[in-house]
Image (cartoon, rainbow, N blue to C red):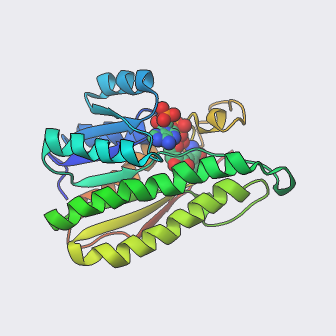
Amino acid sequence: MVLKDKVILVTGGSSGIGYSIAEMAKNKEAKVIIAARNREKLDKAAKELSAFPIVCDVGNEKHVTECYNTIMKEFGRIDALINNAGFGYFSMLDDLDKTKFEEVFNTNVVGAALMAKYAARIFKKQNYGNIVNISSTAGTKGYAGGTAYSATKFALKAMSECWRAELREHNVRVIHVNPSEVQTDFFVNSGRGKREFNPTKLIGEDIAHSVISALEMNDRGFITELTVFATNPK
Ligand SMILES: NC(=O)c1ccc[n+]([C@@H]2O[C@H](COP(=O)([O-])OP(=O)(O)OC[C@H]3O[C@@H](n4cnc5c(N)ncnc54)[C@H](OP(=O)(O)O)[C@@H]3O)[C@@H](O)[C@H]2O)c1
């Protein structure tokens, strides 16, 4: 896909990885829409990026349908959904909080599915589209304290495979991306405190580069899954 003038929706585009993807897509002259819950943060990011902001909680179906109604009214089509909105909840099994478990599932799994559901309806009509699911290496291997978060990302992997099976014949490419640790607000937002910046570890731009490169591949083909590690983290 040539990104110039394409309509690209980035959920969680107000921060971290999503912000970097939105920025790189914008640099390729795409029409970029960013969606997130916190209006103030979203409007600030939209101004910096010259992107179109839509306040949307991906786990709320009414917000999701309104989001696509706005996109179709403003842009008339959509070429790619970057399903990036997400957060972490980490706890040892014997301390697992049911409410927090359900909340993280509602965004990372149900939210991703709702965003894809309404995108798929449009993509089928257009006979064209792209879905990029931002998963995690936590979705490839479990670890201590990862029950809830890792489960959401394994679930996303399952959904990527299902959507691919349903949508390929409609010329929809479903690309699954597994970043390892990326230095964003993710850690603070998941209650694990601020980490010192480490120049040997990944930054949002590294994931954005992987996503944009995958999207730029000729529509004849697509990369099913990408896993991104820091080369030699210290
Ligand atoms: N950082 C890492 O190490 C890492 C590694 C692998 C994968 N990932 C994945 O990468 C994605 C982005 O994370 P990040 O590191 O960029 O974290 P981040 O800086 O905390 O950004 C998360 C973004 O998602 C939005 N968001 C959260 N819940 C939402 C909801 N229910 N509806 C709409 N937007 C929502 C946030 O905005 P609001 O709070 O305003 O809604 C924010 O824009 C996540 O799916 C995460 O699991 C991160």
Position of 50 with respect to 202 (left or right) is left
Report whether residue 218 is seen. Answer: no
Q: Quadrant of the C terminus?
A: top right
Instruction: Depth check: give the residue in front, 220 or 123.
Output: 123
Q: Eyeballing the image, is 122 above or below 202?
A: below
Q: Eyeballing the image, is 35 above or below 101?
A: above
Report whether residue 190 is seen. Answer: yes
What residue lies at 25% left-to-right and 39% top-to-bottom? 32
Spot occupied by residue 141 in the image (x, y as percentages of width and height): 67, 66
Position of 229 with respect to 145 (left or right) is left
Q: Quadrant of the N terminus?
A: bottom left
Q: Looking at the image, how many numbered discs can be counted on the residues?
A: 0
Spot occupied by residue 232 in the image (x, y as percentages of width and height): 62, 51
Spot occupied by residue 38 in the image (x, y as percentages of width and height): 46, 28
What residue lies at 39% left-to-right and 27% top-to-bottom? 42
Spot occupied by residue 152 in the image (x, y as percentages of width and height): 59, 59
Q: In which image quadrant can residue 37 be found?
A: top left
What residue lies at 48% left-to-right and 47% top-to-bottom? 59
Position of 53 with respect to 125 (left or right) is right
